[in-house]
Image (tube, grey):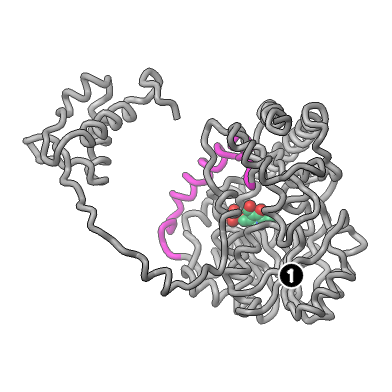
């Protein structure tokens, strides 16, 4: 946001002036009248009244009808001692820092080259606004919703996984985001003290959700074809794990997919161990080259696969709607776990999702998105090839929006990430996606994070840091 008063809106100018006057004045001091503010800042009476009401609500000002506006009394800060909490809390069970980095809202001046979400120009914001305003006119928009989700939305989400999966609306549990889906699944499937196997490297939010459930996170080795079935079998046998987490399609962070000839083997190995497989299918809508393979869920008859998807990835980060799809008794367990959390997902958001997914605009958005993503993948690959040839991208994904770029052997990904951050460029340090110390250094780059020109200028800025 610019500080230049010539481009600030009337509301910003008034708000800034009142805050400054309140900060430098004493409680009870009189502040400029609305009329004076209107004249000085060329703002409308409505704008000034709104800003004053906001600052009253924030306890910055007080108003007395007919008398004027005054600096509000200050809250007294009393001496506090939180030392006892460290004793009561004991050692932390998880360090959520890598996830915090993933979700921090980037400063407008940063060049974002790594993000878990689409850049705003790829989000269907106009369509979402239209869907939301239709949703607001639905008769029960602010009423409670069925704890498992609105039946209409469950039907839409069931059909979105494709006919091969034979999913019924009753198998679908609507959740407020993929991350909540993960915490619910892991809390339900992995008892405290048990082990969960996660593809290595993996999505840090899955590790955090595992640790938050009180379970241990252990690595399941992968290669260019994704999970390695034989090693997965050994890891299941040695650890006694009953839960495996994987992203079979365009995985975050590597962009790799499970090789078609491993699908059956992975499912068999999981079945032999009597385990569940969490299939995080976040990128199903983002397959831009060819047709997306059926989810693993489609090859599973006996309820081994618990499937997860989220609308935040193909729509916008704050359309916090996801789906957990499961069959058999686990479905009821998951629904009960959700009830313990928050009863139901905001009906308003569910209605908006229904309006969007069932509109003619939805398939048009997906088609545009996919055609843009392929252009941006190629733009990022070209920029990396020309500007930072020391970065090697060994796998070119056909979907999703992440590239896994290998750094030269002597380079340290953590240092590259912080150096880039100092130069106002956001990249992902490969080690944040690993459970064990990696032997090679990588950066996660995301081609959905900016337009082609932004991607190129981000890579140019990154090149200057790599050269330092
Ligand atoms: C692989 C993967 N799964 C799940 C999530 C959770 O996304 P959300 O909670 O926004 O739906 C993310 C977010 O970055 C992710 O990358």
| Quarter of the figure that contains the C terminus | top right
**Figure quadrant of residue 450:** top right
277 in relation to 349, above or below:
below
Residue 365 image position (x, y, % from top left): 66, 40
Q: Is residue 366 left or right of residue 86?
A: right
Please state which of residues 444 and 411 is positioned toward the viewer in this rendering.
Answer: 411
Ligand 1 sits in quadrant: bottom right
300 in relation to 386, above or below:
below
**Figure quadrant of residue 299:** bottom right
Residue, disc 1 = 197
Judge: label 1 CB < 8 Å from ligand 1.
no
Residue 197 image position (x, y, % from top left): 74, 70
Please say whether residue 198 is one of the residues in the magenta stretch. Answer: no
| Quarter of the figure that contains the N terminus | top left
Element type at mark 1: strand
Residue sitting farthest toward the right: 261
Residues rendered magenta in the picture:
116-144
């Amino acid at each position: 946001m610019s500080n230049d008063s010539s481009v600030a809106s009337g509301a910003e100018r008034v708000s800034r002036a009142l805050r400054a006057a309140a900060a430098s004045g004493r409680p009870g001091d009189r502040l400029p009248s609305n009329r004076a503010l209107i004249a000085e800042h060329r703002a409308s009476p409505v704008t000034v009244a709104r800003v004053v009401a906001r600052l009253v609500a924030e306890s910055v000002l007080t108003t007395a009808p007919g008398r004027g506006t005054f600096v509000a009394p200050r809250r007294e800060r009393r001496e506090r001692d939180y030392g006892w909490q460290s004793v009561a809390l004991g050692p932390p069970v998880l360090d959520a820092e890598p996830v915090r980095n993933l979700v921090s809202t980037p400063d407008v001046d940063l060049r974002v080259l790594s993000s878990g979400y689409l850049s705003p120009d790829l989000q269907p914001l106009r369509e979402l606004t239209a869907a939301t305003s239709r949703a607001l006119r639905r008769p029960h928009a602010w009423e409670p919703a069925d704890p498992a989700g609105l039946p209409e939305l469950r039907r839409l989400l069931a059909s979105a996984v494709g006919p091969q999966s034979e999913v019924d609306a009753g198998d679908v549990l609507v959740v407020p985001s993929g991350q909540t889906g993960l915490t619910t699944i892991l809390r339900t499937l992995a008892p405290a003290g048990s082990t969960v196997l996660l593809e290595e490297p993996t999505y840090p939010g899955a590790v955090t959700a595992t640790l938050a459930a009180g379970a241990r996170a252990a690595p399941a080795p992968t290669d260019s074809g994704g999970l390695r079935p034989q090693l997965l079998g050994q890891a299941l046998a040695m650890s006694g794990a009953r839960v495996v987490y994987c992203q079979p399609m365009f995985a975050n962070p590597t962009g790799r997919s499970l090789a078609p000839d491993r699908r059956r083997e992975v499912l068999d190995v999981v079945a032999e161990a009597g385990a569940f497989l969490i299939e995080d299918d976040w990128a199903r809508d983002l397959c831009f080259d060819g047709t997306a393979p059926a989810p693993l869920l489609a090859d599973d008859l006996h309820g081994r696969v618990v499937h997860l998807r989220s609308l935040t990835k193909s729509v916008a980060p704050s359309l916090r709607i996801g789906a957990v799809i499961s069959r058999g008794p686990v479905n009821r367990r998951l629904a009960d776990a959700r009830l313990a959390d928050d009863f139901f997902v905001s009906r308003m958001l569910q209605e908006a999702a229904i309006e969007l997914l069932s509109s003619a605009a939805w398939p048009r958005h997906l088609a545009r998105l996919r055609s843009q993503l392929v252009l941006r993948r190629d733009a990022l690959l070209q920029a990396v090839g020309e500007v930072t040839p020391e970065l090697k991208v060994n796998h070119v994904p056909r979907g999703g929006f992440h590239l896994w770029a290998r750094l030269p052997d002597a380079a340290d990904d953590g240092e590259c990430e912080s150096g880039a951050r100092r130069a106002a460029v956001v990249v992902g340090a490969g080690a944040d996606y690993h459970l064990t110390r990696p032997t090679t250094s990588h950066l996660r780059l995301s081609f959905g994070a900016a337009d082609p020109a932004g991607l190129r200028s981000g890579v140019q800025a990154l090149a200057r840091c790599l050269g330092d």
